[in-house]
Image (spheres, helix red, strand yellow):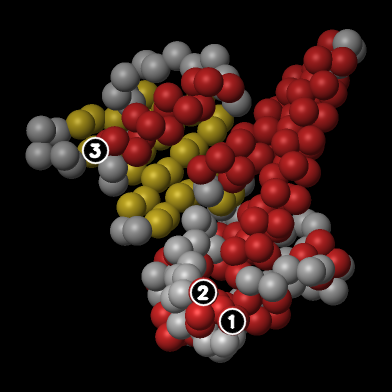
Amino acid sequence: MFNHSLSIKLDDSNFLLWNQQVEAIIITYKLHQFVVNPLIPTKFASDVNHDLDHVSDAYQQWLVKDQMLFSWLLSSLTKFVLPCVFGCKHSYKIWDKIHKHYYSHLHAKKCQLCSKLKSLKKRSSLSIAIIVCFKSMWILSLGHLFGFVSNKCDPPLFIYCKNNVCLYVLIYVDDIIITGSSSSLITNLIQKLHVSYALKKLGSLEYFLGIEVKHLSSGVVFLS
């Protein structure tokens, strides 16, 4: 696993993509307990062992795996990001520092976009600016909060795939289509988005961009 190479290294422009690739590997090899709320075994079983510097076997086994993951995470960072994790000695420390650093930047960027949108006054440039700003805010929100990634061939399409569950969000101006393999996750996504955006649920999809959608009781969907 620790020889698993990524297609990119983390820099200031690709955090969401880096995070998606790294999380997929961590989940595949069941290593989340090393980076999120880590369960660290007791280093010394007793005060006597502490005085004798006798480290417990459980801690030594944990430390070996942690340091292998730690080394792999470091190798996935560019030289420009390495100063952000200076002083970190364990995987969870790197994970925590990187996410706090980039999430604060994403939040600041989102606030900047909102402020820019509110400050627009010229009618001629409003529609273009709204499309650009809303698209940017959707990318930040869906990526930051839920781990969605914008499709490279079709940017308005956002995709989430994790633990054999896939969700798809398609955005066209102010219309949004949400579908996927888990109805509970779809409901959860809508509820969380509603906290930040004024959403109106229109029910099952029937028409979209001139396309008629028919739903059968078997679950099959026809487009015409």
> Which residue is painted at 29% across and 24% down in the image?
204
Towards the viewer: 85 or 72: 85
> Which residue is painted at 82% across and 21% down in the image?
115
Task: Tell whether 143 sits left or right of 209.
Answer: right
Q: Secondary structure at mark 2?
A: helix
Q: Considering only vertical position in the picture, is 162 above or below 196? A: below
Q: Looking at the rendering, which quadrant does residue 88 occupy?
A: bottom right
Going by the numbered disc 2, the residue's amino acid type is: Asp
Q: Secondary structure at mark 1?
A: helix
Q: Position of residue 136 (x, y in %)?
A: 70, 37
Q: Which mark is residue 222?
A: 3
Cα separation between marks 1 and 3: 72 Å
Residue reaching furthest to the left: 218
Find disc 1 in the rendering and name its residue: 51
Find disc 2 in the rendering and name its residue: 47
Going by the numbered disc 3, the residue's amino acid type is: Phe
Towards the viewer: 119 or 187: 187
**Which of labels 3 and 2 is toward the front?**
2
Towards the viewer: 40 or 66: 40
Q: Position of residue 50 (x, y in %)?
A: 56, 79
